[in-house]
Image (cartoon, grey):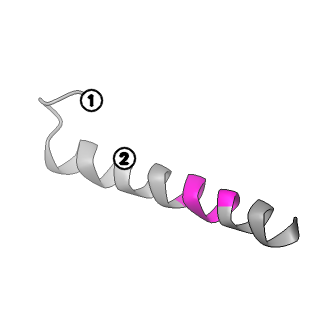
Amino acid sequence: MVRVGRGVCVAITTVRIVTQVYRSVAPDRRA
């Protein structure tokens, strides 16, 4: 259970970072 929770936290953090970078690279393309 702990591993699953950690994986979810890491996945959410990664998605947030990727989203911010994607926005910075292509602000005119809103996803």
Residue 14 within the segment the image draws in magenta = no
Label 2 to label 1: alpha-carbon separation: 9 Å
Expressed as whole percent of the image width and height from the top left, the position of residue 6 reads 75, 67
Q: Which mark is residue 18?
A: none
Q: Quadrant of residue 30?
A: top left
Quadrant including the N terminus: bottom right
Residue indicated by mark 2: 19
Above or below for 6 versus 23: below
Amino acid bearing label 1 = Ala
Q: Nearer the viewer, residue 12 or 2?
A: 2
Residue at the limit of the structure toward the right, as seen here = 1
Q: Which mark is residue 31?
A: 1
Residue drawn at x 76%, y 64% as measured from the top left: 4
Amino acid bearing label 2 = Thr
Residue drawn at x 26%, y 42% as measured from the top left: 23
Q: Nearer the viewer, residue 6 or 29?
A: 6
Label 2 environment density (alpha carbons within 10 Å; few <14, some 14–19, many ≥20)? few
Expressed as whole percent of the image width and height from the top left, the position of residue 10 reads 62, 65
Residue at the limit of the structure toward the bottom, as seen here = 3
Expressed as whole percent of the image width and height from the top left, the position of residue 5 reads 79, 60
Please indicate whether residue 23 sits to the left or right of residue 11 in the image.
Answer: left
Q: Nearer the viewer, residue 14 or 2?
A: 2
Q: Secondary structure at mark 1?
A: loop
Magenta highlight range: 8-13
Pointers 2 and 1 in contact (C-beta within 8 Å): yes
Please indicate whether residue 20 sits to the left or right of residue 1 in the image.
Answer: left
Q: Quadrant of residue 8?
A: bottom right
